[in-house]
Amino acid sequence: MTATDASCAVCGNSPCRLVSETSAWALYECNRCGFLFKVGEKTDYESLDLDAYLVFAYNRSSEVDEICACLQPDYPDVQGVCILEIGCATGEVLNELRNRGAKVYGVEPSHVAAEHARSKYGLTTVFEGYFERNPAGMQPEVFLLLDVIEHLDDPSLLLAKIASAMSATSVLVVKTGDSGSWLTDHCKDRWAYIHLPQHRSFYCKRTLDYACKKAELHVDRIFRYRDPYGGIAWRKLIKNVVKAVLLCMTPKDSYLHRRLYIDVANDHLLAVIRKASRI
Ligand SMILES: [Zn+2]
């Protein structure tokens, strides 16, 4: 793959700029919508065992606090609100939302992860498979896509499917890494988030605007978060600023540059999205 045949899955722009290459993948950037994407190695999710999912199986209440804060203007309280999480993995977020009174559903392609959600938390409304409109006849008021779209080469099909299942009043909350944050924008391919093998696509607000418009959706509001799983990671943040300064001062091919990465901190966003026809 060369720069001339790497086209942007979000806005169709081609060619996209080659940012960097490793032995496993090449990273491109679209200068129109800001989409950053990897071409190369892919993860076989079917082959992942439960251990690969259990790294996220910890208390997610801080993250759920942030999700609830984003929903406040529409849903001051999640009590009784019907919430569907698409790609719910082992169910920790759904379990927390259910504890706060929400009526929760989940869809999860991994058999082992969905089974864990059902057996550990008794989440009987977690279904195995990919999202299709209206599974089990539910009418979600809130759709959640948390740390999902960075795993897809092209988010268009999934966003269009969700849009077709949304009502005029329902909202979609998307959470993903923010490639437009100060640190990640300055360090690009030295951002550790990019180097996770399962991550393929990276978004800033501009990219989400393009992706949503294509699916007849509209980004209503964006919240930037310091830590991917809730709260403020001050130590990581300070460490990252020091690293970023060193990276900016260091020649690209130096020993130092190759060894330094910006950790995942201060670079996640939550977008609250509606159907475009509502505005
Ligand atoms: Zn683009």
Image (spheres, helix red, strand yellow):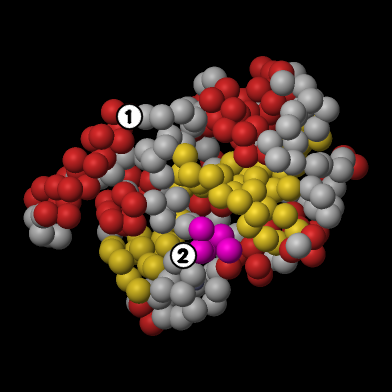
Image quadrant where residue 252 sits:
bottom left
Residue 198 seen anywhere in this rendered image of the structure: no
Is 118 one of the magenta-colored residues?
Answer: no
User: Residue at the spot x=66%, y=69% of the render?
Assistant: 214
Q: Where is residue 256? Give x, y as percent.
A: 11, 48
- Label 2–label 1 contact, CB within 8 A: no
Amino acid at dot 2: Phe
Q: Work out how far the residue at label 2 is from the one at label 1, CA to CA, in angstroms.
A: 28 Å
User: Residue at the spot x=84%, y=52% of the render?
Assistant: 167
Is 206 one of the magenta-colored residues?
Answer: yes
Res. 35 mark: 2
Res. 9 mark: none
In the depicted view, which residue is nearer to us: 237 or 118? 237
In the depicted view, which residue is nearer to us: 124 or 156? 156
Mark 2: which secondary structure?
loop
Mark 1: which secondary structure?
helix
Circle nearer the viewer, 2 or 1: 1
In the depicted view, which residue is nearer to us: 180 or 19? 180
Mark 1 lies on residue: 234
Q: In this view, does 47 lie above or below 204?
A: above
Q: Does the residue labelled 2 lie within 8 Å of ligand 1?
A: yes
Q: Where is residue 34? Give x, y as percent.
A: 44, 66
